[in-house]
Amino acid sequence: MLYVVRHGRTESNASGLLLGRGDPPLDELGLLQARATAEAIGPVDRIVSSPLLRARQTAEEFGSDIELDDRWIELDYGDFDGRPVADVSPETWAAWRDDLDWAPPGGESHRQLGTRVRQACEDLLDEATIRDIVVLTHVSPVKTAMAWALGVGDEVAWRCFVETASVTSIGTGRGGPSLRGFNDTGHLHGL
C-alpha cells in the first residue's frame, strides 16, 4: 500500500498563507496530528519525505530511517509564497485554474509539478504491491498522486480539498494503481 500523507499543521497553514517552499516547523497541533497519523497507519516498511521541515517532522513520527526525495516538495509558489490566499486576485486564480502551464512569477506550473510527482509515484508502484510505503508531502503533491491513481489530468487539483495530516491510500495490482482512500482525517478527531 502507498500512503500519501500531508504534513501536520503549521502556523502559516493556520493563518491562510500560501505555503510552498517556505520552511516553517509544525505548530503544537501539527505535532499532535503527525503523531496521530503515524499511530493510525501503524508500522510501515519505507518512509519517504519531502525535504521541507514540516514534512520531515511528520515523517519522524513514523521512524528514523527517512529517505528524502525532492520530487515530493510542495509546488513552488514563487512570488506568492507566504502571501495570504486572499491577496491573489480573482483574475489570477482564474488564469491559474484554466491553464496547467501557468505559473506564479518565479514559481512552478501544475504541469511541472505533475511531471515530477507522477514519476515519483511510478517509481514506488511495484514496491507498494508487496510493502507498505508512506510518503510525507504537501497539499499539491497529494492532489497529483490522487490524480495519478485515478488516471485523470492534473486539472482535477482545483476540485478537491486536502486537509493537514490527512491520508490518501493508493493500492496497487495488475491493473495499476487504485485509489482506496482520499483526505482521510478520521484519526484526527478529538485533537
Image (cartoon, rainbow, N blue to C red):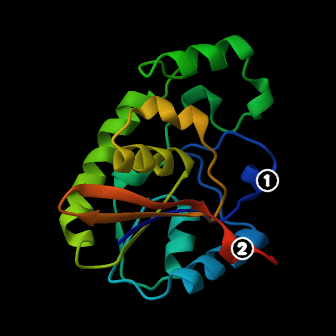
Q: Quadrant of the N terminus?
A: bottom left
* Residue bearing the label numbered 1: 14
* Residue 36: x %, y % from top left: 65, 81
Indicate which disc residue 138 carries: none
| Of marks 2 and 1, the one in the foreground | 2
Q: Is residue 114 left or right of residue 141?
A: left
> Could you tell me which secondary element the residue under label 1 belongs to?
helix
The residue shown at (52%, 37%) is 157
* Residue 5: x %, y % from top left: 51, 64
Indicate which disc residue 188 carries: 2
The residue shown at (25%, 47%) is 119
Q: Amino acid type of disc 1?
A: Ala
Q: Quadrant of the C terminus?
A: bottom right
The answer to whether residue 108 is visible is no
* Residue 177: x %, y % from top left: 30, 57
Residue 175, quarter of the rendered image? bottom left
The answer to whether residue 182 is visible is yes
Among all residues in the image, which is located at the extreme front? 175
Q: In front here: 26 or 94?
A: 94
Q: In front here: 112 or 160?
A: 160
Q: Earlier in the sequence, mark 2 or mark 1?
A: 1
**Residue 4, relative to residue 1: is it above or below?**
above
